[in-house]
Image (spheres, grey):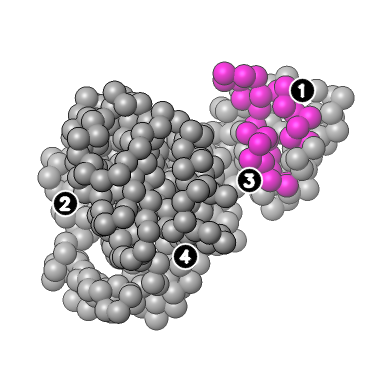
Amino acid sequence: MKEHIDLIFVPSIGHWLHGKKPERIARFCTDTRSLCPDDCYVALADVRDGHIFLEDARTNGASCAIVSHPRPNIDLPQFVCDDPYGAMVEMAKLARSMFRGTVVAVTGSFGKTTTKDILKLLLAVEKNATLGNKNSRRGVPMTLATVTNDEAFAVIEVGIDAICTMNKLVKLVVPHIAILTGIGKIHMLRMGNKSIIAREKSKLLREAIKNNGHGIFPEECLRFSACRKIQDHCRVVKEDGEDVGYRMAVKGDKYHIEVRFKEKALKFVMPRLMSSGVAKDFVLACICALECGISPANIQRRISLWKPSKWRGEIIATSTKTYFADCYNANSVAFVNSLAQFDRLFPHGSRLFVIGALIYCEIGNGVIGDNATLFKSLPLRENDGVIVIGDSTNFSMDAINCDWKVFPSTSQAMEVVTNFHGVVYLKGHRTYKLESLIC
């Protein structure tokens, strides 16, 4: 790691204040609140000047910082350059150029982080992977800058929320294999419509194809011309497909999946807590792993270790209630999958659905109709209750035929949730912070 640091922090980018360097860098981080020991803190000047948090970075265990304005009074190695973000991008380019392994990139409107996490398991990647869902114009270079040849694969999650954002990111990632998990309504105010979303996200697959690699995406993406244009260079995964496809069945409390790939039918058993949507994410990751030479036996052994990550279908039990916490993201596709999983795991007893209503800035002009469809899809049974949180201008409650309550904010729902005994379903956009209801 010391050699890696010396290589990527080159004089053409900047210099170390007083020649003082760190011993190691675990990751790059732009927020001192989420900084971990040995992280390199990147002092950006956005809404607030990141340089004012240098002392916090030192206190929280940063190994060094990238700055444009050094503060010699703070006992922390500081790499001084004109543009900390630009420096991080240059470091990412250098680290990527030195990486000799296979780069797998994941994008899509839903399932990106889950697919990335499954790929980490199947490809036995521990360090060369996106941390959490840090998949933005900041997150991608932050990950790439710490990729090393200690592992044979790198798994990079790529998210976009505006047109043309992908153009720069694909040049950083330079993937050998790119996975598109699916296309849905998200970031609609900036992206316009799903066809544009498909066009922008498919650029990642086009980059892999250009680099003599290929893309992987589910058959439903063929609804969009951007995907149809590249299908001859991609693995198009079809349900019941004979060439590249899968079959899924529930036996007992687990999904049994048959994956068809290169004239072979391979059978896998999924962990109990895996939903049907996550099982489909597994299929995409499995095709990729097989392409990378991972044996079916290793795939089965490794996927058996899977469990939901924090707040993504996680089950949390307390003395008075059980929470099904799936409150990390929210779109129509994710809701359908999540609700089916909840109903499968908790078919009986008292249940309280806490729903963060779909929001205008994500869904766009169809938000009221989409919320109505969502509310009608709730698998309600006798004695179930519903709490909807959000701006009432985004929805009408006519679609819910049960005991329901509306709260403008999550904190206002705390008393009702606290006094409830049974199973609580939590799902909504990150802005709602529904996890704060877990107590």
- Alpha carbon separation for disc pair 2 and 1: 51 Å
Q: Which residue is mark 3?
A: 27
Q: Is residue 251 left or right of residue 75?
A: left
Q: Is residue 197 magenta?
A: no
Total count of labels: 4
Which of the two discs, 1 and 4, labels the residue nearer the N terminus?
1
Amino acid at circle 4:
Lys
Question: What residue is shown at x 80% (from left), y 37% (from top)?
Answer: 59
Q: Nearer the viewer, residue 402 or 97?
A: 402
For this view, does 201 lie left or right of residue 147?
Answer: left
Dot label at residue 220: 2
Which of the numbered marks, if any, corresponds to residue 126? none
Q: For the residues labelled 3 and 1, say whether their Cβ atoms are less than 8 Å apart.
A: no
The numbered dot on residue 307 is: 4
- Please tell me whether mark 4 sits on a helix, a strand or a loop: loop
- Mark sitting earlier along the chain (3/2): 3
- Which is closer to the viewer, label 2 or label 1? 2
Q: Horizontal and vertical percent for residue 66?
A: 68, 31
* Measured Cα–Cα span from mark 4 to mark 3: 24 Å
Labelled disc at residue 70: 1
In this view, the mark in front (4 or 3): 4
Measured along the vertical axis of the image, is residue 39 above or below residue 317? above
**Which residue type does callout 2 highlight?**
Glu
Q: What segment carries the magenta color? A: 31-58
Dot 4 or dot 3, earlier in sequence: 3
Query: Would residue 179 be seen by someone viewing this image from the given angle?
Result: no
Q: In this picture, is 257 found above or below 38?
A: below
| 384 to 362, vertically: above or below | below
